[in-house]
Image (cartoon, helix red, strand yellow):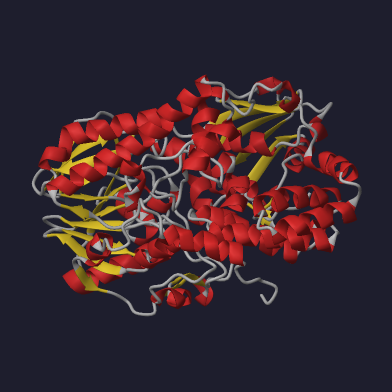
């Protein structure tokens, strides 16, 4: 990628000023000490392969992070975090507790029970989870997995489950699977209903399309990046409903704290009274987390988050000698554990309260984001830095949760869409050349945010304008080089890359569907919700399609009705009102829904049967959109 640029003098100056930030103690080595503590073994030149030799995880490409001093193209604070996230391997953090770090975005924890292993949060991919289990086995010998605990409903905490156990073992009762109440519904809702757009934006957020080097992806803040292996989901066999619930799993007593609507809709912390050890799931981490995640998700409740962290302090802090989380490294020592929990609690509470204080003074979302700062007592802690979330966009999340997208100014109520507005802004500027002249002058003055804004108008007015795209890319690139939040850096640099390598959308088709393991885990009701989102409403105008469905393997029945351009489904069949009746197994239905086979093929193979007008079913299937995983973001 020879078109990437060096850091400008303005970027070098901005990054050098970070080193002089009076809030930060650059001599503090405690994080490095804790991140290295208890190392048992590691795989040098770690590379994990999946099917057909495809690399699903590798740390090889991050060798450039060995140097201690940050290059001009990386914010020094982010560089420090990126180097910490390179400390990988098998770690013993307690007599009976081990962690494998650096094998995926998240951390997998192994508890040594009386007869086997309890696995907490088995990563994103089966391949990376299997690799982590192999490290443990090499050290402890063969031990069966007897339980899996999902702390919450994000894919990096359950997706690798089939790398540590099997559906057969769970179904036979040999392995318990525990999760907070509402786990499955929340996991499927987030990863399927809006799955395609989240996946596309996650490519930006985690820098999956960027080279891994000093001018590209250096980290994700929460970990290195996301693995690209096989995602699976095995439904929980036990749900934790109430705080204070205590269970004995293979000789280890665990007391649970349910924390809904914190970092995830369904999440839980838990305490091990035998060990005086606390697991805070992802409610704590060694960075400021997201109240709004840039890949897209429902806005999180900062007040609830701080409330449950306060409850954790009250319930467990006085007994906790060690706290570990689902990302990063543990913290040892009662006083440090209390301080860590207290200052993370207060960070989220400060963002909540001060955003609303300023909103009640009449400041808008954007104005609040420019004004609000953490006080030095909070900003000076490395674990509160904006490596993942940021004060800027988290304050916007608080505003959005209470007040929505509208700032109250009627001129912003029904704004022109980007392409139409872009053309008018270009006209107002005196044409493309005049706008570019102004933007080039602003670039030479280091005004990169403004350059990105004005050139964006020209790109949307005329996406084929190479000068506009290249100048916009140059501005985004410098913003990326300066960013402390890894997601900001990755968004900026991925946008710059796509602007420079712009290709018309029609020349790069790509289709997206949920992982088959996720679809298999969906209830029939959830499956219909997914199909309803795929229904092309305008194309369904004037159509009425009524289908009875029978799943011959599960005995489930349903009625599907397309009318008024929407899909409604019920657990009752339509009987005489149906145009056709379809009988097949759930696995065959899943394959058809995922586009891996056709109804006609399954009828010919005798795996599906239709009674009535088969054309109506084909008509229904033809109304279901297939989504483009690589839709445009930085161009129209």
Residue 443: percent from the left, percent from the top? 71, 58
Front-most of residues 177 and 333 = 333
| Residue at position x 48%, y 53% in the image | 485
Which of the image's four quarters has the N terminus? bottom right
| Residue at position x 52%, y 41% in the image | 393
Would residue 295 be found to the left or right of residue 382 on screen? right
Front-most of residues 603 and 306 = 306
| Residue at position x 38%, y 73% in the image | 68
Residue 301: percent from the left, percent from the top? 43, 31
Front-most of residues 596 and 463 = 463
Q: Quadrant of residue 100?
A: bottom left
* Residue 632 in view in this figure: no
Residue 457: percent from the left, percent from the top? 79, 47
* Residue 510 in view in this figure: yes
Q: Quadrant of residue 283?
A: top left
Would residue 110 be found to the left or right of residue 462 on screen? left
Q: Determine whether 43 is above or below 504 in the image.
A: below
């Amino acid at each position: 990628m020879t078109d990437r640029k060096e850091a400008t003098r303005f970027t070098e100056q901005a990054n050098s000023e970070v080193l002089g930030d009076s809030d930060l103690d650059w001599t503090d080595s405690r994080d490095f000490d804790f991140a290295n503590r208890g190392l048992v073994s590691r795989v040098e030149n770690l590379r994990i392969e999946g099917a057909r030799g495809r690399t699903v995880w590798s740390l090889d490409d991050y060798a450039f992070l060995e140097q201690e001093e940050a290059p001009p193209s990386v914010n020094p604070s982010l560089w420090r975090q990126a180097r910490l996230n390179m400390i990988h391997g098998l770690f013993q953090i307690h007599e009976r507790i081990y962690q494998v770090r650096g094998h995926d975005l998240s951390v997998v924890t192994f508890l040594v029970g009386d007869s086997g292993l309890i696995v907490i949060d088995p990563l994103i991919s089966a391949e990376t989870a299997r690799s982590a289990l192999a490290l443990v086995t090499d050290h402890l010998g063969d031990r069966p997995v007897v339980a899996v605990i999902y702390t919450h409903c994000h894919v990096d905490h359950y997706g690798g489950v089939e790398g540590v156990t099997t559906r057969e073992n769970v179904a036979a009762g040999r392995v318990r699977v525990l999760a907070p109440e509402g786990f499955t519904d929340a996991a499927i809702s987030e990863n399927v209903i809006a799955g395609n757009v989240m996946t596309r934006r996650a490519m930006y957020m985690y820098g999956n399309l960027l080279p891994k080097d000093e001018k590209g992806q250096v980290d994700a803040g929460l970990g290195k990046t996301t693995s690209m292996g096989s995602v699976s989901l095995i439904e929980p066999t036990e749900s934790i409903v109430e705080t204070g619930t205590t269970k004995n799993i293979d000789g280890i007593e665990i007391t649970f704290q349910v924390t809904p609507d914190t970092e995830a809709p369904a999440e839980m912390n838990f305490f091990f009274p035998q060990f005086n050890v606390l697991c805070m799931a992802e409610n704590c981490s060694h960075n400021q987390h997201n109240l709004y995640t840039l890949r897209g998700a429902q806005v999180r409740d900062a007040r609830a988050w701080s409330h449950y962290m306060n409850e954790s302090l009250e319930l467990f802090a006085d007994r906790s000698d060690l706290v570990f989380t689902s990302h990063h490294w543990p913290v040892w020592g009662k006083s440090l554990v209390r301080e860590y929990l207290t200052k993370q609690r207060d960070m989220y509470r400060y963002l909540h309260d001060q955003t609303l204080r300023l909103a009640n003074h009449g400041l808008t979302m954007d104005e609040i984001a420019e004004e609000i700062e953490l006080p030095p007592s909070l900003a000076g802690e490395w674990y509160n830095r904006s490596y993942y979330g940021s004060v800027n966009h988290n304050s916007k999340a608080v505003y959005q949760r209470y007040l929505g997208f509208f700032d109250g100014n009627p001129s912003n109520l029904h704004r022109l869409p980007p392409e139409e507005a872009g053309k008018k802004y270009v006209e107002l500027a005196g044409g493309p050349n005049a706008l570019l002249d102004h933007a080039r002058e602003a670039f030479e003055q280091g005004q990169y945010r403004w350059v990105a804004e004005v050139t964006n108008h020209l790109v949307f007015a005329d996406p084929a304008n190479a000068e506009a795209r290249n100048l916009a890319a140059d501005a985004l690139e410098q913003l990326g080089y300066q960013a402390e939040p890894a997601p900001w850096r990755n968004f900026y640099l991925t946008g710059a890359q796509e602007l420079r390598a712009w290709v018309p959308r029609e020349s790069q088709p790509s289709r997206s569907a949920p992982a088959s393991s996720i679809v298999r885990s969906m209830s029939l009701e959830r499956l219909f919700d997914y199909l309803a989102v795929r229904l092309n409403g305008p194309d369904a105008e004037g159509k009425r399609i009524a289908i009875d469905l029978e799943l011959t393997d599960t005995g489930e029945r349903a009625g599907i009705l397309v009318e008024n351009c929407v899909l409604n489904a019920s657990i009752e069949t339509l009987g005489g009102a149906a145009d056709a009746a379809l009988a097949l197994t759930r696995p065959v239905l899943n394959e058809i829904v995922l586009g891996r086979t056709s109804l006609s093929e399954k009828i010919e193979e005798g795996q599906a049967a239709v009674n009535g007008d088969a054309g109506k079913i084909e008509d229904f299937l033809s109304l279901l959109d297939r989504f483009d995983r690589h839709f445009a973001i930085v161009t129209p």
